[in-house]
Amino acid sequence: PTFASSAKSTLIPSSSQAAALGGKQSGDLFVWIYSSPYPPIRGNNTFEALVTDATGQPVKDAKISFDLDMTNMSHGKNVVPANPTSDGRYNGKVSFMMPGPWRVIVAVERSGQTSTVRFDFNVNSK
């Protein structure tokens, strides 16, 4: 089986209100990012990253952060650390100052190496 299909069975958000912003591969890792509420709104949101290895097993020993920036106007550095919640899942509280196009770069640090994946998405006003 391919990498994505082997990981597919574990890619379920932990909250029924969370929905995927997308999933991407970085090296031997696969990262899905979820937002609650979905789609993200101006103000407070919860982001969850689900990280699996090439065999679809959850990665439990990573340090995860969300680097947020608006793509059409920078609001300065905004990096949010994510806390482990369960097998391969990490979440953090994020806040968006305004609606529009945003990007999150998810950094996955483990065994002294950092992998990153980026996701572009829109934030709604409410």
Image (cartoon, rainbow, N blue to C red):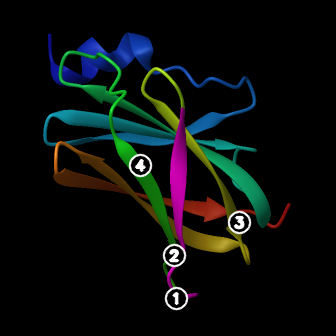
- In the image, residue 88 sits, relative to residue 6, either above or below, namely below
Structural distance between the alpha carbons of marks 2 and 4: 17 Å
The quadrant in which the C terminus is found is: bottom right
**Percent from the top left, x then y, of residue 54?**
18, 23
Counting other residues with Cα less than 10 Å from the Cα at mark 2, is it few (<14), some (14-19), or many (20 or more)?
many
Residue at image position (51%, 56%) is 81
Structural distance between the alpha carbons of marks 1 and 4: 22 Å
In front here: 20 or 88? 88
Q: Which residue is mark 2?
A: 69
Q: Are marks 1 and 2 in contact (CB under 8 Å)?
A: yes
Q: Which residue is mark 3?
A: 95
Q: Assign a secondary structure to mark 3.
A: strand
Q: Indicate which disc residue 110 carries.
A: none
Residue at image position (36%, 16%) is 8
The mark lying in front, picked from 2 and 4, is: 4
Residue at image position (54%, 43%) is 83
- In the image, residue 9 sits, relative to residue 13, either above or below, namely above
Structural distance between the alpha carbons of marks 3 and 1: 14 Å
Span highlighted in magenta in the image:
74-84
Nearest to N terminus: mark 1 or mark 2: 2
**Percent from the top left, x then y, of residue 88?**
42, 26
Structural distance between the alpha carbons of marks 1 and 2: 6 Å
Q: Are marks 2 and 3 in contact (CB under 8 Å)?
A: no
> Can residue 41 be seen here?
no
Q: Are marks 2 and 4 in contact (CB under 8 Å)?
A: no
